Amino acid sequence: MNYEDRDTHGIYKGDNQASGARLMGAETLIGNDVCNQNGDDLGDIKEIMLDTTTGKVCYAVLSFGGVLGIGSKLFAVPWSALKLDTKEKHFVLNVDKDRLENAPGFDQDNWPNMADKSWENEIHSYYGTTKQ
């Protein structure tokens, strides 16, 4: 599903359609598809993690793998590693499926402490990003 389909408030209608790629409603991002540069499906965004002290988006939590959501693994991906493809209306993460499958992940009942500096460094190192 894409952000235009999830837009119940009319954010991306008319003149706002062009600005939608820069300023987007968080509710419309949850559930958006994520693909890699080859068009392979990497799952969808389950949650967006905000730093409440800076107001910045830090991570998108992706669900990947499993069948019908059962057995899927969650991955916190640095927001800066995602790029919005406005033509295809999905996010692009520049990793192969195998790399994502082997990424540091967690299950829905055991979330990591995302404020932990060593966890943060591991995630940014894995995706080749720096903390914003």
Image (spheres, helix red, strand yellow):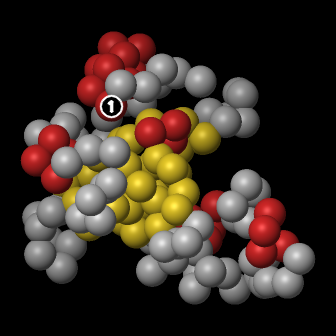
Could you tell me if residue 126 is visible in this image?
Answer: yes
In the rendered image, which quarter contains the C terminus?
top right
Q: Residue furthest right?
A: 15
Whether residue 82 sits left or right of residue 98 in the image: it is: right
Whether residue 48 sits left or right of residue 10 in the image: it is: left
Packing grade of label 1 (10 A; few <14, some 14-19, many >=20) is some
Q: Position of residue 122 (x, y in %)?
A: 29, 20
Up/down of 112 relative to 13, above or below: above
**What type is the residue that disc 1 sits on?**
Tyr
Q: State the residue at coordinates (12%, 67%).
A: 66
Indicate the quadrant where residue 67 lies. bottom left
Q: Position of residue 71 (x, y in %)?
A: 11, 64
Up/down of 94 relative to 3, above or below: above
Whether residue 88 sits left or right of residue 22 in the image: it is: left
Up/down of 57 relative to 37, above or below: above
Q: State the residue at coordinates (77%, 75%).
A: 17
Indicate the quadrant where residue 86 lies. bottom right
Q: State the residue at coordinates (62%, 33%).
A: 51
Q: Position of residue 8 (x, y in %)?
A: 69, 85
In the rendered image, which quarter contains the N terminus?
bottom left
Residue assigned mark 1: 127
Could you tell me if residue 109 is visible in this image?
Answer: no
Where disc 1 sits, the SS reads helix
Whether residue 110 sits left or right of residue 114 in the image: it is: left
Indicate the quadrant where residue 31 lies. bottom left
Q: Nearer the viewer, residue 51 or 2?
A: 2
Up/down of 32 relative to 97, above or below: below
Q: State the residue at coordinates (33%, 31%).
A: 127
Q: Position of residue 83 (x, y in %)?
A: 51, 50
